[in-house]
Image (cartoon, rainbow, N blue to C red):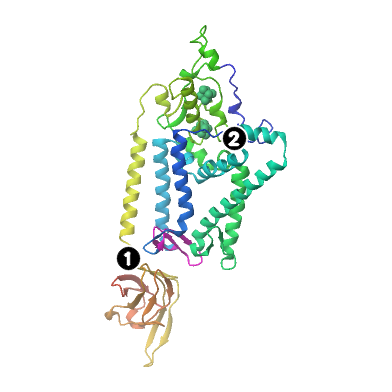
Amino acid sequence: MDDVSDDFRSVMASVDRRGRRKWVYVHIVPGIWRRRRLVVAYLITALVIALPHLRIAGRPVLCIDFPHSQYTVLGQVFWPQDLSYLLLLLLMAIIGTLLAVSLVGRVFCGWLCPHNALLEFIFRPIEELLEGPAHRRIRQDHAGLHPGLILRKLVKWALFLLVCMTLASAVAALFTGADAMVGGIHIDAAEHPGGALFAGLLTAAMLFNFAWFREQTCTIVCPYGRLQAAMLDRHSLVPAYDARRGEPRGKAAKSAAAEAPAALGDCVDCKLCVSVCPTAIDIRNGSQLECINCLACIDACDGVMAKLGRPAGLIAYRSENQLSGQPRQVLRPRTLIYGAVLAVLLAVSAIRIGSRTDLQVMRLRVGAMPSLVRDAAGNQLVRQDLTLSVINRTGDEQRVTFGLPDDLGASLHLVEPVVVLGPNQRREITPTVDIPEQRLHGSDRATILSITSSSGTHVDLPITLRAP
Ligand code: SF4
Ligand code: SF4
């Protein structure tokens, strides 16, 4: 391996020693992993486009409604008061990622990340369709522009723009609602100027990313890739080159030469594994941070081995332990701990969502000071204003009434004796409690405010009536 440069340790493959970017021309090769990833990528793309239109029980699968301070997930409506659900979801995502990484390596990057799915299976194929495969594009770009190439590049950019607009509008529609989309590819600017502006900015960002920035998102910007590297251990699956079998590398003709059949390993140094790599790294140098787990190098090398009549798997998806001839341990302490924590979080979420009542009532601004008033008979009363947030969690209208215990001797006044809440509506109401001063005996008094809805839900809200 004397000819193997150590540059990869100090210089990224996609930049030169002076820090200037080297454009990565990625060869697309067929293979089993590419076919599998293609299915997943198209499912993700279809999901992104369809998501704003999907509904469960008449409500969106996902909608973030900032003006009304509510968000809908899987048809369930949440408000800022439900922040704990969001935190649970976030925790589950983190633990789920840890579990997935410990089991199958950086699976998110290569398989589930929308950036990679769209770049590898939408944008690069469009580019290859219009400008030809990588080796031709290299030649063309070095030869300079001519009218035919300019036309092809213009068509490519137009298609890129169309795809970016469609995807950006679908994302923006998660905030504005699917009704704001026109023709499925842009947001109605007259009705939804904020949504249209967001979609426009997102379109520009996506175009910049997919047409030019590309692999730098993974190698420079994304912090997730850096973190994932720290989560891997010797049992995690990674694309790995079998140096014991491949080295010393050398051209196939030499390898097959009768005079030195055993002098060379199976790697014929064709560098196809490098030219298919979206981050331009050479996996033969070992696992590297820039590897996004796309497995294209495995497809490429298996193809080469097949042509040479040698067994596949010179580069394969395996753990470091497997590479050194030891068995891979799937169940190990970290996977069991992650799995157990994830199961607990799932159970807690299911119980919390299952026990959500149709009506949520919260007292706001408990610091309101009481005042002294007199009733028509001249009795001294302590008046306390309450501010309540009432949320109807059902898809039907609810009529809500309020009451205090009879033995309290207090009266409750509301502008509307029956508060009407539309489906999934939140309202703030300000009932007033008048209580004879002598009932408080000069100190605060705890009691229960009863709230009953027309759906039969009953909520007892503990409140404290403060002494003046
Ligand atoms: S594709 Fe396989 S044979 Fe060709 S350089 Fe890479 S590891 Fe060696
Ligand atoms: S090294 Fe292989 S798996 Fe990693 S990014 Fe490059 S081609 Fe994909």
Secondary element at tag 1: loop
In the image, 194 versus 459, the foreground residue is 194
View extreme (top): residue: 259
**Amino acid under disc 2:** Pro
**Image location (x, y in percent) of residue 219:** 57, 38
Q: Earlier in the sequence, mark 2 or mark 1?
A: 2
Asked whether residue 28 appears in the rendered view, the answer is: yes
Residue in the picture at 59% in, 45% down: 210
**Image location (x, y in percent) of residue 105:** 43, 35
Residue 347 higher or lower than 102, as above or below = below
Asked whether residue 289 appears in the rendered view, the answer is: no
**Image location (x, y in percent) of residue 463:** 36, 72
Residue in the picture at 31% in, 75% down: 454
The residue that disc 1 covers is 357
Residue segment shown in magenta: 59-79
Residue in the picture at 38% in, 92% down: 378
Residue in the picture at 43% in, 45% down: 94
Label 2 packing within 10 angstroms: few (<14), some (14-19), many (20+): some
Residue 416 higher or lower than 265, as above or below = below
View extreme (front): residue: 148
Does residue 386 appear left or right of residue 439 in this picture? Answer: right
The alpha-carbon separation of the residues under discs 2 and 1 comes to: 59 Å
Using the rendered view, name the quadrant where residue 414 is placed.
Answer: bottom left
In the image, 449 versus 87, the foreground residue is 87
- Res 133 label: 2
Label 1 packing within 10 angstroms: few (<14), some (14-19), many (20+): some
Quick check: is 256 in the magenta stretch?
A: no
In the image, 230 versus 464, the foreground residue is 230
Task: Indicate which label's residue lies in the foreground, 2 or 1.
Answer: 2
The rendered magenta stretch, by its main secondary structure, is classed as strand
Quick check: is 70 in the magenta stretch?
A: yes
**Amino acid under disc 1:** Thr
